[in-house]
């Protein structure tokens, strides 16, 4: 295994900085996401079963795969989408699709992340697709994570933004309270994710593709051992899954103002 990834260092002994056609310091965050996504698609080979990620970065990878299929540079690709949104995008772009029932082993998944810590642990699911993402990416031989440098944190929850937990609707406030109490020493505030109704109507709980709700954990401090925290969260009967993806990423691609860094977990 390679050395831990330092969010404040562009390249390490077992990482590489990829030359870019333009000074990245002049690019927008969206353009950086696109650069990282295109670099990730270089890992895709004809005949692969590909996990298609969800979110603002992953959508660029899905679009690029479609372009290469249309150009004949890729053939016989089967995509497994991680959300209904990605499913709709892939269908519109003509990417052949299937699911884990038909293809229980995925060759490669490409997806973004909301946070990446120095050990390549992730926070995912602020878009609400964490369960399907974890199922598909957990079944993958290789999982390439694509981010811009704003997603790098010192510890999980370090951005101050949500660490999502998917919960069943039944007595969801009870489950929310249990999760908040679990991480009270880390200054946790747990909130049920709400969605504003159409035309500015009353807010209602946000619903995942699986018909569940999401409790967002906002942390002031490091929660410590992530494996212990993971097990504690999953022990609550009302919890379906959480958005910490621990030890799953095999490659991290980061686009930042100094270049594109590729980090392989296994050196």
Image: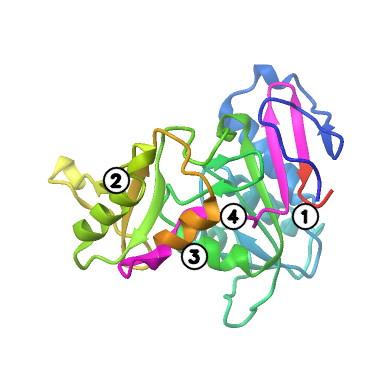
Q: Label 3 near label 2: C-beta < 8 Å? A: no
Q: Nearer the viewer, mark 2 or mark 1?
A: 2
Measure how far apart labels 2 and 3 are at the Cα level.
Answer: 22 Å
Measure how far apart labels 3 and 1 are at the Cα level.
Answer: 30 Å
Q: Label 2 near label 4: C-beta < 8 Å? A: no
Q: Label 3 near label 4: C-beta < 8 Å? A: no
Which one is earlier in the sequence, the residue at label 2 or at label 1? Answer: 1
Res 105 → quadrant? bottom right
Which one is earlier in the sequence, the residue at label 4 or at label 1? Answer: 1
Q: Is residue 74 above or below residue 258?
A: below
Q: Is residue 152 or residue 34 the one in the foreground?
A: 152
Residue designated by label 4: 246
Residue designated by label 2: 190
Q: Nearer the viewer, mark 4 or mark 1?
A: 4
Residue 120 shown left or right of residue 132 in the figure: right
Q: Residue at 65%, 44% (x, y): give it.
A: 146
Q: Is residue 137 or residue 30 the one in the foreground?
A: 137
Query: Residue pushed farthest right?
Result: 13
Residue designated by label 1: 71
In the rendered structure, which segment of residues is drawn in magenta?
234-262
Which one is earlier in the sequence, the residue at label 3 or at label 1? Answer: 1
């Amino acid at each position: 295994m390679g050395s831990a990834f330092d969010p404040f260092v562009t390249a390490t002994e077992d990482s590489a900085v990829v030359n870019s056609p333009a000074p990245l310091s002049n690019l927008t965050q969206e353009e950086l996401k696109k650069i990282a996504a295109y670099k990730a698609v270089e890992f895709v080979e004809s005949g692969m079963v590909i996990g298609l990620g969800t979110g603002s970065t992953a959508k660029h990878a899905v679009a690029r795969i479609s372009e290469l299929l249309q150009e004949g540079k890729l053939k016989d690709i089967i995509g497994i989408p991680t959300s209904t949104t990605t499913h709709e995008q892939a269908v519109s772009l003509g990417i052949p699709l299937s699911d884990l029932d038909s293809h229980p082993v995925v060759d490669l998944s490409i997806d973004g992340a909301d946070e990446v810590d120095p050990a390549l642990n992730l926070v995912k699911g602020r878009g609400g697709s964490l369960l399907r993402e974890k199922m598909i990416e957990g079944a993958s031989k290789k999982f390439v994570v694509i981010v811009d440098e704003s997603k790098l944190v010192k510890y999980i929850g370090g951005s101050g933004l949500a660490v999502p937990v998917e919960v069943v609707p039944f007595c969801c406030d009870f489950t929310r309270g249990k999760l908040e109490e679990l991480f009270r020493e880390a200054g946790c505030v747990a909130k049920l994710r709400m969605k504003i109704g159409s035309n500015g109507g009353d807010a209602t709980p946000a619903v995942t593709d699986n018909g569940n709700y999401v409790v967002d954990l906002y942390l002031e401090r490091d929660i410590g051992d992530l494996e212990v925290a993971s097990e504690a969260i999953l022990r609550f009967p009302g919890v379906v899954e959480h958005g910490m993806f621990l030890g799953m990423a095999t490659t991290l691609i980061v686009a930042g103002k100094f270049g594109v860094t590729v980090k392989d977990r296994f050196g």
